[in-house]
Amino acid sequence: MNGIAVTISHFATGALAAALWQGLLLAAVVALGLRLLPETPARVRFAIWFTTFGLMIALPFTSFRTGHTGAAAVTAAPRAWLTIDDRWCLWIFGVWAAASLVRAVLLGVAAYRVHSLWKRARPVSLPRVETLPGGRKLELCVSDELDRPTVIGFFSPRIVIPEWLLNRMSSDELDQVVLHESVHLSRRDDWLNLLQKIALVLFPLNPALAWIERRLCLERELACDERVFGLRALLWLTLNA
């Protein structure tokens, strides 16, 4: 049996073993800690969950390097509590590779659709949001292909609003939507979200990682809402001082 294939299959098996107990345990501990601190701001919760996300990605590499990867310890530790035959390791790696391929294809299709939407979106004039703090330029656009506002584009970001919604919003509501999406850009949420999706492609069989990724999406929106509320409150105090 090819030595490289066996090594890779052992890594995949060890990573899966780490995901099933180390990852779930880490996610449970963090979730319990945050539940005990209900007043934690969303931006802090996001930072905690993103750090946990990164640690969970690093766990398989650390474990495999030190020779204590649970299932993969068949070749690294003489007293391993669990051993798996090389053929099973290769089968697990095959499932891992297939799941990664499916996620990669889905991510590629989504990226193509988003790029197409970016090109078809029609710019509208709103000079006051041409730039953001930090130098990121943006455009406000409309599209009839969306059902809610979103921001797309990494190097030339566009805030895209459904055309039907733009026609119904008041000036104040439009300001709030634009500010919310602008906060996403100032936080670099677009790039962080891309890293999340790539991580799921590389580790498709990690249930804890997938759960935390969904948690990050929720906390990201709440963090933006909190910042928008703070900015608008500061503006109100400034105007009424």
Image: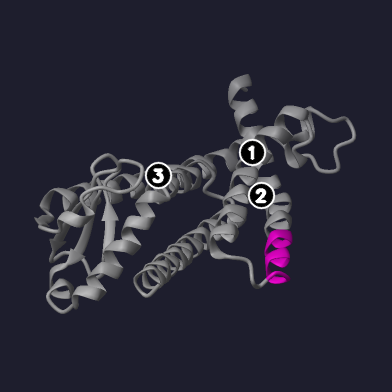
Kindly check if marks 1 and 3 are in contact, taking CB atoms under 8 A apart as contact. Answer: no
Which residue is label 3 attached to? 191
Give left or right: position of 103 versus 204.
Answer: left
Kind of residue at disc 3: Trp
Which residue is label 1 attached to? 58
Mark-to-mark CA distance, 1 and 2: 11 Å
Kind of residue at disc 2: Ala
Between disc 1 and disc 2, the foreground one is 1
Helix, strand or loop at label 3? It is: helix
| Magenta stretch prevailing secondary structure | helix
Position in image of residue 143 (x %, y %): 14, 62
Vertical placement of 84 versus 40: above or below? Answer: above
Between disc 2 and disc 3, the foreground one is 3
User: Which one is in front, 163 or 240?
Assistant: 240
Kind of residue at disc 1: Ala
Question: Which residue sits at x=16%, y=64%?
Answer: 145
